Amino acid sequence: MSPRAPIGRFTSHWVLIPGNDIDTDQIIPARFLKTTERTGLGPHAFHDWRYQADGAQKVEFPLNQPGAAGAEILLAGHNFGCGSSREHAVWALQDAGFRAVISTRFADIFRANALANGLLPIQVEPGFHGVLVSAVPGTELTVDLANETIELADGRTTSFSLPPFSRYGLLKGVDELDFLAGAEPDIAAFESAHAARISTLAVSRSDA
Amino acid sequence: MGAAPRTLFDKVWDAHLVRPETRDTPAVLYVDLHLVHEVTSAQAFAELAARGLKVRRPDQTLATMDHSTPTTPGASRLTVVDDAARSQLDHLARNCSEHGIPLFPLGDDRQGIVHVIGPELGLTQPGMVVVCGDSHTSTHGAFGALAFGIGTSQVAHVLATQCLLQTRPKTMEIRVDGRLAPGVTAKDLILAIIGRLGVGGGTGHVLEYNGEAIRSLSMEERMTLCNMSIEAGARAGMVAPDDTTFEYLASRPAAPKGAAFERAVTDWRLLSTDAGTVYDRHVHLDAKALAPMITWGTNPGMSIPVNGLIPDPAEAKDERERESLSRALTYMGFRPGQALAGTPVDIVFLGSCTNSRLSDLAAAARVLRGNRVANGVRMLVVPGSQQVKRAAELQGLDRVFRDAGAEWREAGCSMCIAMNDDRVGPGRLAVSTSNRNFEGRQGPGARTLLASPLTAAATAVTGVVTDPRTILARVAA
């Protein structure tokens, strides 16, 4: 993936996937991780909740309902994205068209993966989360990254907070690897002051 | 004025700061050891290629094949029949060759689960920062290293710069006083801890395990403990190094030798939390009060003593918990208040980065020796590495498993993640020594009960969920 495009403000309806502690094995089951690409995972997002064993859709699952079409926001329960570190979970959600996930808490690794890819992990208070859960299906929400707010069409709004560095990078299209590469002089200085503790090359050559 | 007291975590973190964290920017943290496997690396190498970047420190990077590899006896590159898996393995081999990264491929006698081979080679050492594109990297915290899982974008960051952007986590002390009773293991302890914290309770925190119970654990037991720190949502888990750690490391290939080892031990002894340090949170458990634990639900926080009863959602503390319990009961096909002990199982899986080391196999063999796996039960024994496999064979453990009717397989992640053909099967019930009981984790529709190697082996013998202490009493008699 090349340095990314900036993210600003967008408006969309959302799709609610109920349940707390949704783990990344549900978001993208492990058998789909054999890909060597970042794309193409969208059809498998929530695969085992979305399809029967014979491949037929489970009509009751939120992503399969007509109102889900075109939704760019996923509304999810507490501790979303726990479990495996698989970044495929973020790629699958983005490939399925999502640009933001709203929850009352995100698991640490999922959150870092989301930020690295520009999928906004928007953490809100339980009260506002409840407002969204009970809103009329199809209601639209505006996500404003610059002001760190989300706003319902009826004017009800709440703020969220991303790490300042992530917010800046997402708004300006600066990516993390470019920033890290800019630390090169400091990395080189650190390495000359601290000799490597181990050598994997040496251990791989030995007949241990 | 003396320096402010610091935690073990603080000391390791501070020693790896290439750039400190500021209000606007995360810290740049140096990585000592980067472990790589086939499933989370291909896209990272592609990222480097797209930007024309090289791997900065191949000498601090080690790759192996473990997740999507077959564990059928005699498995090699040639026996990988799954085209997607084969392509992924080929990508890793090509990427490692191109960048000069040492690789222990399928068929190599040092191949194995990434979190088993790092420690057994002595690459994981106290005070290091260790990362891998795998959440169970927390395993390496057993050595007093700061070790955590990262996503593929961050794998690319480390490959290219040997550094990561990180914000400082909070610290939580888990103090476990007393000693574990016979038949109660490190696996039971960590299941009890996760049950206490909940699967999100450790979010944003690094756990430090302290207390008499922790001090008396072997290194392999400490690895089991730290391995599942992520299942409480923690960024990492750590145990301060001590003589147990140094003794484990002394003979390892990558550990310093002779006078250099003595000097290293002197430094490593400084890696403990200073008296008077305040953690952000404290949790306290009494080891003596713990029984063998088993999960009944669909996340690792849903556990009960093996002789206990499955909770009733009606007694949940809030709506959120009620909803979670109900959902798990529905998936698992269990009733509120039901006992698990005595429940027939279809599969017993002994393996995974949590419990596939020599002592885990030996514990299970102690129960299985002279016994048979019950009719109708399939038991897979999957050593964590080729080295573990050979060591077990030298002790005759493979014979014990085979004589009992269990399958003795090649090293790999196997049925923990079910990326290969090792799957439980829809609706079937497994007792597994692995780390995750999520819906479908062990294959679509699989139902998983997590437990210790002792409980798994006792269950294999009887065919129903069994308190291992009942069989251990018989074995000892």
Image (tube, helix red, strand yellow):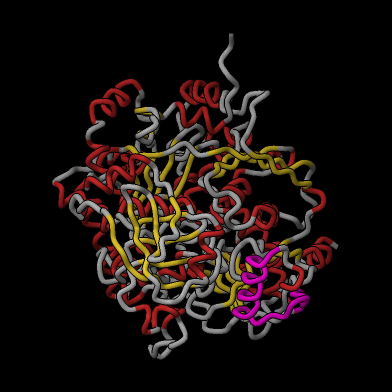
Direction from residue B6 to residue A182 in the image, left or right = left
Q: Residue furthest front?
A: A154
Looking at the picture, tell me which residue is in the foreground, A123 or B132.
A123
Residue in view at x 29 percent, y 69 percent? A97
Q: Quadrant of the N terminus of chain B?
A: top right
Q: Quadrant of the C terminus of chain B?
A: bottom right
Q: Residue furthest right?
A: B477
**Residue B135 in the image: above or below residue B212:** below
Quadrant housing residue B365: bottom right
Q: Write the start and end of the magenta stretch as one range.
A: B318-342
**Residue A200 in the image: above or below residue A92:** above
Direction from residue A49 to residue B105 in the image, left or right = left
Residue in view at x 33 percent, y 37 percent? B163
Quadrant housing residue A11: bottom left
Residue in view at x 58 percent, y 11 percent? B2
Magenta segment includes A192: no
Res. B39 visible in picture = no
Residue B263 coordinates in the image, percent (x, y): 50, 20
Magenta segment includes B326: yes
Looking at the picture, tell me which residue is in the foreground, B416 or A106.
A106
Res. B232 visible in picture = yes
